[in-house]
Image (spheres, rainbow, N blue to C red):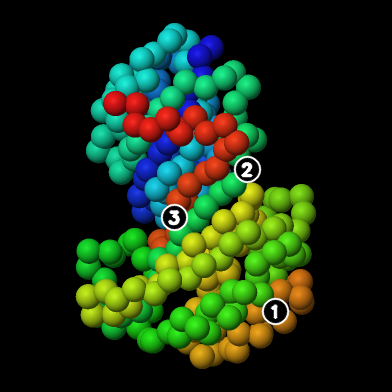
Amino acid sequence: MPRYAMKIEYNGAPFAGWQRQDGLPTVQGAIENALAKLEPRAHTIAAAGRTDSGVHALAQVAHCDMERDWVPERLMGALNFHLKPQPVAILDLRPVADDWHARFSAHERRYVFRLLSRRAPATHDAGLVWQVGHELDLGLMQAGAAHLIGRHDFTTFRASQCQADSPIKTLDALRIEEMPTNGGREYRFYLRARSFLHNQVRSFVGTLERVGAGAMPPENVKTALEARDRAACGPVCPPQGLYLAGVGYADDPFAGGDPR
């Protein structure tokens, strides 16, 4: 069966996460339903990561197996047609080898978190950022973030229901940028690792926001990390500011540019 890799963008607000769930709207379910319009049967697709309810994607990657050979541009166009009006779009679609796997072939995941510091309510970015009404200190958050980079036991920053075999992960990068916005400041957190624990990014950002607000010193991030205790974590921030921004592969099927 021909296999195709898909690069997918979505707004996670109306979905109960990526993973298919009976009776609930999910991104996986939406795409599988669109595939069934093209080849009427049960479809099961696999993704590089399973985003939670309310989390968005700029470049999620998944693969599907079809019964017949499709011209990639036509398959992508047909899927986008059948996905309307849901906020899901196939940005790119490429044929891949039978043993290529969206999850197991990936060697890197990249996330972006958007945090808006502004007293006036967000309008254009409502549902797309986490908003706080107080000022934040970029330098303090960067100092706190430095303690998280590298290979650590991240028990403090994983959800209690996390199903990963081990809490030990390597965080390759955690960079924070500040930019002016209309009436406030936006802080963007860029994170990169081979894989992440459940709620790890939101736990990081929630803790670092407390540092930026002056509620805890940067060195307390190191103390919390070394405690290996979920109770030492700061508040887990809401999902709407989180985006799966990209997935890395040694043999990237999308490296050839736009198929059009």
Q: Position of residue 130 (x, y in %)?
A: 39, 69
Q: Secondary structure at mark 3?
A: strand
Q: Earlier in the sequence, mark 1 or mark 3?
A: 1
Which of the 4 image quadrants contains residue 178? bottom left
Per the image, the residue denoted by label 1 is: 222
Which amino acid lies under the numbered mark 2 shown in the image of this protein? His
Disc 3 to disc 2, C-alpha distance = 18 Å
Q: Which residue is mark 2?
A: 107
Of the image marks 3 and 2, the number of the one nearer the N terminus = 2
- 79 lies left or right of 110: left
Q: Secondary structure at mark 2?
A: strand
Query: Residue 28, image x and y in percent?
Result: 46, 36
* Whole-percent x, y for residue 210 in the image: 52, 83
Question: Above or below — where is 220 with respect to 110?
Answer: below
| Residue toward you, 23 or 126 | 126
Q: Residue furthest top?
A: 68
For this orientation, the residue located farthest to the front is 256
Closest to the observer, 56 or 114: 114
Q: Nearer the viewer, mark 3 or mark 2?
A: 2
Question: Are the two marked residues, 3 and 2, in contact with CB atoms closer than 8 angstroms?
Answer: no
Which one is closest to the eye, mark 1 or mark 2?
2
Identify residue type, mark 1.
Answer: Lys
Picture coordinates of residue 164, whole percent (x, y):
71, 51
User: Which residue lies under the disc numbered 3?
Assistant: 243
